[in-house]
Amino acid sequence: MHNGTSHNPSLLQSLGYIGVKTERFDEWSAFAKDLLGMQVDRPSKRNISLRVDDHAQRLFIEDGRDENVSVTGWEVADANALAKLAAKLSDAGQEVSLEPRIIAEQRRVSELISAKDPLGNRLEFFHGPEQATSPFVAGRALSGFRTGQLGLGHAVLTAENLDAVMPFYTDLLGFRLSDYALRPFKAYFFHLNSRHHSFAIVETGVNGFHHLMVELNSLDDIGQAYDLAHLEENRIGVTLGRHTNDFMTSFYARTPSGFMVEYGWGGRSIDPANWQPFECDYGPSFWGHERSWLGPEKRAEALQLRLDAAALGRRAPDFVRGNK
Ligand SMILES: [Fe+2]
């Protein structure tokens, strides 16, 4: 595994976009605008495009019965990097497709290729995201989303068995391990840039998409969304809390499709060139984050880990926003 000293950057730079297949367009439109505060463009009844920054599109929602994330899109530097990645994947026996112009136009990028991970999750790799011609206008009053070179946020998958899928992400795609936990569930966290993790995978016994994290510039954006989420029954999937590894203060909202969006603030910036991965053996949260998706035994274990962390006075460093 990565020894932390020989820094070998991935061809991937950041999480660029995600796509969702759903039949619940009205719910998605209201959820994205009124709770998450994204900018909603709905060119037709069954087609929604979402913005969070100066990219023309960061999420797209299309017609389908899956009620799930249909694709995660990862940004590379340029056409040369994309060609290198395509060659690397196909040399390793992976099926790679160069997507036609019409798909690139839908994704609002210059060029993209697609592949599948060993679990069948669709991945796209692209360069040249289209820049919007108008400033970002939030769906509700908020301070703004923290993106830039950190990308859209992070994507987290669940897996029946991590061993079957991890080499694809580490050896082929070049995701670098940030840290990992074995209790109360196995979870591995990976970075591509100074965001502590752009990708993670959790062993839950089921293959699927767990959550997309988006980060806001102000803690109050999170608190105000939390109040709004409380107005709706079953909207909150994980209560407000603070993570031990990326220091994110967040809650998780259930999307209309069932997977979750983590709505966070205060994520740490790491230095990928000097980062040393380690086992995080004191649980995933300093406090809070009661997880509705965990069974009662694991929830009890998670609570005990939090109480232990509290008894030991574990806490995140004082928050200082660097400019990374
Ligand atoms: Fe997360």
Image (cartoon, helix red, strand yellow):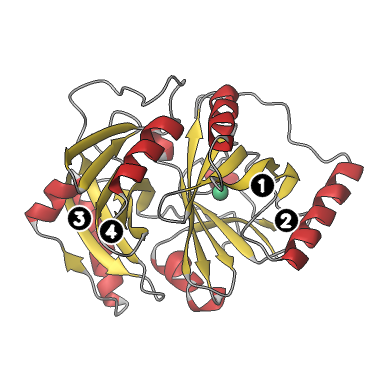
The amino acid type found where label 2 is placed reads Cys
Q: What element carries label 1?
A: loop
Q: Residue at x 60, y 41 (%)?
A: 251
The residues bearing labels 1 and 2 have C-alpha atoms spaced at a distance of 7 Å
The answer to whether residue 312 is seen in the rendering is no
The residues bearing labels 2 and 4 have C-alpha atoms spaced at a distance of 30 Å
For the image, the number of numbered tags is 4
The mark nearer the N terminus, 3 or 2, is 3
The reply to whether the C-beta atoms of the residues labelled 1 and 4 are less than 8 Å apart is no
The reply to whether the C-beta atoms of the residues labelled 1 and 2 are less than 8 Å apart is yes
Q: Is mark 4 on a helix, strand or loop?
A: strand
Figure quadrant of residue 10? bottom left
Q: Which residue is drawn at 67% across and 26% down?
A: 319
List the residue tagged with mark 4.
124
Q: Which mark is residue 245?
A: 1
Left or right of 64 on screen, residue 280: right
List the residue tagged with mark 2.
280
The residues bearing labels 3 and 1 have C-alpha atoms spaced at a distance of 32 Å
Mark 4 neighbour class, 10 Å CA radius: few under 14, some 14 to 19, many 20 or more: many
**Up-down relation of residue 62 to residue 140 (above or below):** below
Left or right of 120 on screen, residue 35: right
The reply to whether the C-beta atoms of the residues labelled 3 and 2 are less than 8 Å apart is no
The amino acid type found where label 3 is placed reads Leu
Q: Where is residue 296 in the image (x, y as percent from the top left)?
A: 74, 64
**Up-down relation of residue 228 to residue 204 (above or below):** above
The mark nearer the N terminus, 3 or 1, is 3
The amino acid type found where label 1 is placed reads Asn
